[in-house]
Image (spheres, rainbow, N blue to C red):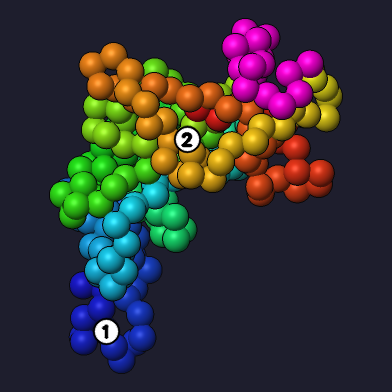
Amino acid sequence: MIGSEKVWDRGVALTSRLQTFETEMLAEEENFAALARINRELIGKVEGLDSAQRAVLDMDSTEIPVYGEQENSAYSGHFESTCYHPLLLFSREGDCLAAKLRPGNVHSAGDWEELLLPEIERQQKQGKEVVFRADAAFAKPEIYEALEERGVKYTIRIPSDENLERDIAELLTRPEAKLQAGGVVQELSVPSGELEDGAACGGQSGVPLRRIVSAGGIHRDQPGNGQPGGGAVL
C-alpha cells in the first residue's frame, strides 16, 4: 500500500494512509510477530556467512523516556522518569536478535524467557555452544536453572553483600581487603582457560557447580581506574 507503483509519482503515501498503516495494520498482533521474524531472518543470513561454533548472547534493558501520556508508558522509580523499559537480546557482534517493549514500571528481567529461550533453542539446533552474559538485574535463580537445564554456560553479575564477601574471601589474593567507596579493591588471578571453560567440575545430578569470582579481577570495560562499582560475577 505504501510502496505501490501507483504512488511513485507523488514520492510518498498520503499522511492519512501512513497513519492507518501505523495505528491499525502494524498494531495487529500477527504483524508484530512478523516484524520480529523479519529482523531475525535478516540476521540469520549474516550468521550463515560466519560459521562460529559458539554463540554469545547478551541481555539487557534500557530506558526510553516519554514526555506525554503515551499508551502503556509508566513511571519508573529506578529511572525516576515516565518511560518505556524495553528488554533487548544481542549477539556478541551487537546485532539485536529480539526486543520487547514494556512499561517503565516492570522489573529489568521481566519476560526474559520470552526472548531468551527461543534464541537458545534456535542456536542449539544449529549445533552451536551457547554462552549467556547479563548484569545483576538478571541474577535470578530461575534464570540460572533454565540455563543449566539447557547446558548453557553463563556469566551474570550479582550484587555484593557481606555474606558474599565472606564466602569468596578464600578466592581473593587479598582477602583482608574490604569494600570501599571507590568500588571492589580485591583482585583475583584466574587462568584464562578457567574463565573460558567456566565451572568444569560437576555438582549433584551432573549440574555444573556455580563459581563466584570477584568482578575486580576480570572487569575490562570500566572507565577510570578500571574498578567496578562493587559486586561479583556468577
Q: Amino acid at mark 1?
A: Val
Q: Position of residue 205 (x, y in %)?
A: 23, 16
Q: Which residue is mark 1?
A: 7
Q: The residue tagged with tag 2: helix, strand or loop?
A: strand
Q: Which residue is mark 2?
A: 155
- Point out the tag, 1 or 2, that comes first from the N-terminus: 1
Q: Is residue 174 covered in magenta?
A: yes
| Point 37% across, 26% down: residue | 201
Q: Position of residue 32 (x, y in %)?
A: 25, 50
Q: Position of residue 88 (x, y in %)?
A: 42, 45
User: Which numbered disc, 1 or 2, marks the residue closer to the eye?
Assistant: 2
Q: Nearer the viewer, residue 194 or 83?
A: 194
Q: Nearer the viewer, residue 133 or 40?
A: 133
Q: Residue 18 falls in which quadrant of the image?
A: bottom left
Q: Amino acid at mark 2?
A: Thr
Residue 61 visible in the shown view: no
Magenta range is: 160-176
